[in-house]
Amino acid sequence: MGMLFSDSSSQVMSFDAISIVGTGGFGKTTLARLILKEEEVTIAFEKTMWVCVSKPFDHTRIVKEIIEQAGEKIPDVVGWDALHKYLCESLRGKKFILVLDDVWTKDANDWNPLKFALDGGASGSRVLITTHNEKVAHMMGSTQNHKLGGLSKDDSWLLFKLIAFQG
């Protein structure tokens, strides 16, 4: 939460990208969902949006879902340029938080067109990324990362015993 409300460190974009990085099943998505439900978040951000990215990184699908999550009607436009323009207009001047869940792409060519479409939002907007890979977080320009670690050996053993030897 502190990362969301800290002063923006981006000198170029209107938003900061923050990543939650960790192995599958460690709770990245759950943590992001809990963050979006916080009253402090719902009050601070005019638009709260969630898009599951997964594989492959499909620009058109992702942009349409962001537009829909922003409360707009998905336009009947053809081509990336028209869709890009519509997304820009949907977010222009609005402070938003967008969760891009389960991002896998390491290719900046996938991210850059979407990044520039999001830049029209109000200063202080945030993009929260969940990913398995620190390289993905770095490529997406995360200004801050929250790395979820694994359980200690003792905690792993305790959990195993509780499940395996119930009663």
Image: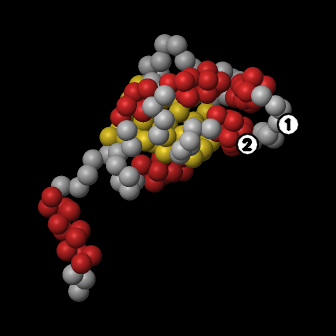
Element at label 2:
helix
**Residue 131 located left or right of residue 157:** right
Residue placed furthest toward the left: 154
Residue at position x 47%, y 18% in the image: 10
Q: Dot 2: few (<14), some (14–19), or many (≥20) neighbours within 10 Å?
A: some
Of residue 16 and residue 150, the one placed in the foreground of this image is 150
Based on the displayed image, in which of its 4 quarters is residue 25 positioned? bottom left
**Residue 159 located left or right of residue 106:** left
The quadrant in which the C terminus is found is bottom left
Residue at position x 50%, y 24% in the image: 108
Q: Name the residue under label 1.
A: 76
Q: x and y percent of residue 45 in the render?
A: 60, 36
Residue at position x 40%, y 27% in the image: 138
Residue 41 shows in this picture: no
Residue at position x 37%, y 38% in the image: 133
**Residue 138 located left or right of residue 87:** left
The quadrant in which the N terminus is found is top left
Q: How far apart are marks 1 and 2 (CA)?
A: 13 Å
**Circle 1 or circle 2, nearest the eye:** 1
Residue 52 shows in this picture: yes
Kind of residue at badge 1 = Asp
Relative vertical location of residue 151 with respect to residue 10 in this rendering, above or below: below
> What's the mark number on residue 108?
none
Kind of residue at badge 2 = Glu
Name the N-terminal-most of marks 1 and 2. Answer: 2
Q: Mark 2 points at which residue?
A: 68
Residue placed furthest toward the right: 76
Of residue 55 and residue 34, the one placed in the foreground of this image is 55
Element at label 1:
loop
